[in-house]
Image (cartoon, rainbow, N blue to C red):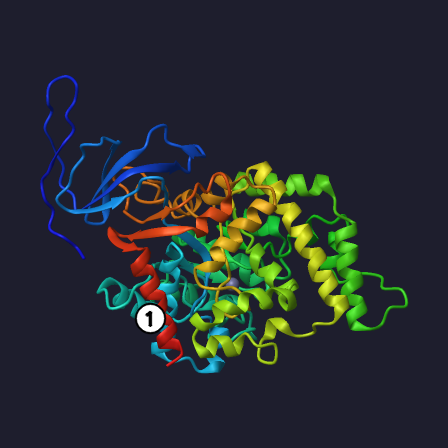
Amino acid sequence: MQKIAILFLILCMSVGCTEQKIDATLLIKNVWVVDVKKGNLLAAKKDIWINGDRIVQIRDHKEQTKSNNEIIDGSGKYIIPGLWDMHAHPDDPEMWRMDPDEYSRDQLMPLFVRYGVTGIRDMAGSMEVIEKWRTKIRSKELVGPEIVACGPLIDGPNPMWDGSVGISDLSKVKPMVDSLKNSGADFLKIYSLLPDSIYFELSKYARQLDFPHVGHVPLTVTTAEASIAGMKSQEHLLNLLMDCSARADQLYAKEVDYGDITNPVDKYVYRNELMLDTYDEEKARTLYETFVKNETWHTPTISMWYKNAYFEQEILKDSIHFKYLPMYMRNYWKPENNDHLQNRLPKIIMVKKKLVEAYKERIGEMNTAGVGLLAGTDVGANPLCFPGLSLHYELQMLVESGLTPAEALRTATLNPALYFEKENVQGSVDEGKLADLVLLDANPLEDIENTKRINAVVLKGEVFDYERLQKELAMVERSVNR
Ligand SMILES: [Zn+2]
């Protein structure tokens, strides 16, 4: 699809006729540009010239604008930057027990692009698989997003999942960090069981190397401690509700007085309700200030929490999308196989639903307090977290949590660019930036659900019009059901 750059003439201005030559391979004409920074539409409809993988010019639309090369008619449409899923693990090590083969795994990649996701931050997997994906995507053997990846999870001596690296003592920290860095990982991902002493040693060393570490705040570390230790992004809001409780110290020390409650399920319910009932606004405010001060990003993955709490209802409407998933993934999402769907007792589900509501409130507060938020889906082993599609669920739930549609859009566009310190090449529709774009049939600033109304995707300058997107989807469907 890469066409040879050509020269063409445009713009006949009132003051004589000005000749304008623009090298371009693609012209998107007469389109509303969503300015994600300001949260509004640019004042006039634009013509956007793209050359290779870059946006080279954006000008007010002129009827007489012509191009001999590929043209997309953007009339009545809205353009946004390509979306980033900042918490994805399509090759989730948890699913390795289902024995996924390379061909099936590959089918996940086009699904991201089909839904306008042009980049993912891969939060756990094998670097070998990632490298294969990257190579195939670069050579156009496979349609897929840009991938920034961490490789294996770093967990405690007895890791929770297959494929993790477990660190048992302080002397192992430096060699482990060095070897992960040398393996091509872009950052480090911390996991829940990492002991606090090892976490603090690791964060210190990673900072020395200027190598970002992100992830689960370990069970025995507070979110404020991890923020101060330089954890660049914290995932799933883990430990946050506990840190916002007036009884946080007791909860961390597992010194809750259960009275005559002995049953583990009832203890779980009691502990969580105690945590929610003792929410302390002042503590929360101080915590958010810490995040802002240390520039700690948060990836709430609220749609993952929601899909888990409401699995029994949600599967009824989500099952129509199963036909696009590889069999091994569909099988892993079955309650009998899935670790995230155990203990579905009504009492436990009730608590999970309450936690979702509390998370939504905290997200709204964090947003108001100026904490940087990132859109992430947790796609992979978590049931009903779909490649591509779920990013739109996440955006919707961020709006339900109190963000404006523009703020929600930012969590998948501008904020990832700021997070990666790459705002010079991505994150907004601007001259000089990568041509990763999504053309929508309706204005996402009016209704965030409009991000799903995808008319075309431009991936590094390559056009996937609606017909081609549907063809990609049909190909995936055939491949996974063969
Ligand atoms: Zn995850």
The percent coordinates of residue 196 (x first, y second) are 59, 61
Give the residue at x 40% y 54%. 211
The total number of labels drawn is 1
Q: Residue 312 vs residue 422: left or right? A: right
Q: Residue furthest top?
A: 15
Where 296 falls versus 220 (above or below)? Answer: above
- Hey, what amino acid is under mark 1? Met
**Residue at mark 1:** 475
Q: Residue 112 vs residue 95: left or right? A: left
The percent coordinates of residue 286 (x first, y second) are 65, 39
The percent coordinates of residue 144 (x first, y second) are 32, 62
Q: Residue 144 vs residue 382: left or right? A: left
Where 341 falls versus 39 (above or below)? Answer: below
| Quarter where residue 421 is shown | top left
Q: Is residue 448 visible?
A: yes
Considering the numbered disc 1 on the image, is that residue within a helix, a strand or a loop?
Answer: helix
Q: Residue 379 vs residue 74: left or right? A: right
Give the residue at x 85% y 72%. 262
Q: Residue furthest right?
A: 260
Q: Residues within 10 Å of mark 1 (few under 14, many from 20)?
A: some
> Which of these two is toward me, 186 or 431?
431
User: Is label 1 within 8 A of ligand 1 (CB to nearest ligand atom)?
Assistant: no
Task: Look at the image and tell me in which quarter the C terminus lies.
Answer: bottom left
The percent coordinates of residue 189 (x first, y second) are 47, 61
